[in-house]
Amino acid sequence: MEQIIQDFKAYLGEMRMFRQAQAIMSFDDSTIAPKAGVAARARRNGFFAQKVFKMTISEEMKGFLDALESEVGNLDAPTAAMYRIAKKNYDKNTKIPVELVREFSELTAKAHVAWEQARENDDFEHFAPYLEQIVAKSKEMVGYRLKEGQHPYNILLDDFEEGMTMEIYDEFFAKLRETIVPVLKTVVNSGKQPEAGFMREFVPKADQEKISFFAAEKIGYDLERGYITESTHPFCNGSHKTDVRMTTRYDENDFISSFYSILHESGHAIYEQSVCDEISDTILSRGISMGFHESQSRFYENVIGRSRGFWEYIAEELKTYLPESFKDITPEQFYRATNQARPSLIRVEADELTYSLHIMVRYEIERMLFNDEISVRDLPEVWNKKYEEYLGITPPNNTLGVLQDIHWSMGAFGYFPTYALGTAYASQFVAQMKKDIDMDALIAKGDFAAITAWMTGKIHRHGSIYTPAELLKQICGEQLNADYYTAYLKGKFEGLYS
Ligand SMILES: [Zn+2]
C-alpha cells in the first residue's frame, strides 16, 4: 500500500506540473501575449487542457482510486484529501460523454463571441440562441451525473462550492433580502450622499503604481514571491506559493479604483502565498474553494479597506503619493467617500451594501432556468423586474442589464452565488478573530501582521486539505450563518446614512 500511495502522489505531482505551466501561460495570455498569436495559443491551451483531462480519467488513475478506496479511513488528512479530489474529478469526467464535452467547449467559444457582439449592439436576440443551447447542453451534461432525487442545479452549485445546495442558498439569500432591501430604502430615503468629487482628481499612473506596491506589501503580500502588472480585468494568478502574480488597471481620474482592486487581489494572493510547505508542491496547494477565496479578497478590500480605522491610518500614508489637492482631506471624508451606497445597474461597480442584491438576481434566475420555470427568451424581462423589485431601478437596455456578465456565455451556472457567500464567510471569520485579537485597534494602527497571521493559521496554511464546510466548522464552530454579514451591513450603513 505504501508504494501505491507514493506512486499516486507522484502521478498527481505530474498533473500539478502541467497545471503550473498552464497557470503561467494563462498569465502571459492575459497580460503581454501579442494579439496575432490568439489561434496558436488556443491550440496550445487546448493541448494542455486535454492532457490534464486525460490524466484525470486514465486507467492509471482508475487503478489508484480502486486500490485506495478501502483504505480511505486509514489515510492521513492530506492524502485523504488528494483521494477525495481525484475521485470527484474522475467521477465527473468519466460520466459525461467526451463528445458532449467537446461540443460544449466549441459552443461556449462561439457563444463568447456572440455575447460580445450582442453586448456591443444591445442585441439580446443575437445571443439568445447560443444561450438556449448552452442551457440545454448544461442540463444534458448534468443529467449524466444526477443521483436519484437530486436537483440538477445542486450539482452545479456543488461544482463551485462543495456541499452547497439550493436549500442552503435559498435561506441565505432570504436573510440578505430581508435585511439589505430595507437598509437600502433607508439610504435612498435619507436623500444624502457624501461629498466625493475630490476622489476624481487626476493622479498620474506612476504614482498610482507606487500606491499599489505600498498597499499590497503593507497588508502582507510578499513581493519577493510576487509580481504586479496591468490587465483589462484585474486578477490573481498563482502557480506556486513562491510565484503568485496579480494585476490591476489604472484610471488616472479614479485612483481609488486601482487601490481597491489591489487590496482585493492581494487577499487572493496572500491566500495562495501562505499555504504550508508540507503541501505546497501537491495538488492541495490551492485555496479550498471559490467562496473561501472570495472571503479573503473581500476581507482585505471591504472589511479592512473600507473601515473607518483603516482610513485613520492610511490617509496620511496615501497623501505622500497623492497630489496637493488631497492635503486637507480628513480620514472621515475618505471613509464616507469610499462607502457611498446607492442602487446601481452594474454588478462589478456595485458598492458593499448592494453587491449581494446583484448576486441574488442572478441566483434566482439560474434557479428558475434549471427548474424549467422560465426560458432563455424570458431573461431580459425577468432580469429587469428583479432589478426594479430589489434595487428600485430598471436597466434602460440589455447591455446594462442581462448582457453585462461573461459567466453565462461560458456556461458557468452556479458560480455567481459564491461571490455573496465569500462575503458572508468573511463576516463569520471576523467574529471569531475578534475573540483572539483586537482587530479594529490593529487596523487603526496600520498593523496587519497579526490579522494576516490569524487568517493564515486558520485558513491559508491548510490549502485544500478540508472541504469548505469542514473548515468553516473548524474555525467558527458552526455552519454558514448569514446573521454576521447582515448585522455588519446594517450596522455600518445605517450608521453612515441615519
Ligand atoms: Zn475575487
Image (cartoon, rainbow, N blue to C red):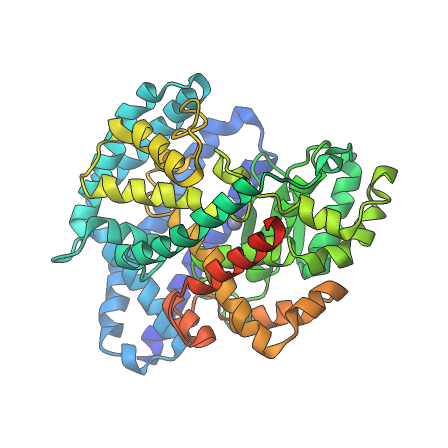
Closest to the observer, 110 or 486: 486
Residue 241 located left or right of residue 357: right
Expressed as whole percent of the image width and height from the top left, the position of residue 85 reads 34, 63
Query: Residue 113 sits in which quadrant?
Result: top left
Q: Residue at x 34, y 28 (%)?
A: 111
Query: Residue 467 sits in which quadrant?
Result: bottom left
Q: Residue at x 29, y 25 (%)?
A: 128
Asked if residue 55 is positioned above or below residue 347 in the image, the reply reads below
Q: Residue at x 42, y 34 (%)?
A: 406
Residue 222 showing in the rendered view? no
Closest to the observer, 417 or 34: 417
Q: Residue at x 42, y 77 (%)?
A: 477
Query: Residue 119 sits in which quadrant?
Result: top left
Expressed as whole percent of the image width and height from the top left, the position of residue 303 reads 59, 58
Asked if residue 129 is positioned above or below residue 216 in the image, the reply reads above
Expressed as whole percent of the image width and height from the top left, the position of residue 273 reads 59, 61
Asked if residue 212 is positioned above or below residue 279 in the image, the reply reads above
On-image quarter of the N terminus: bottom left
Residue 479 located left or right of residue 488: left
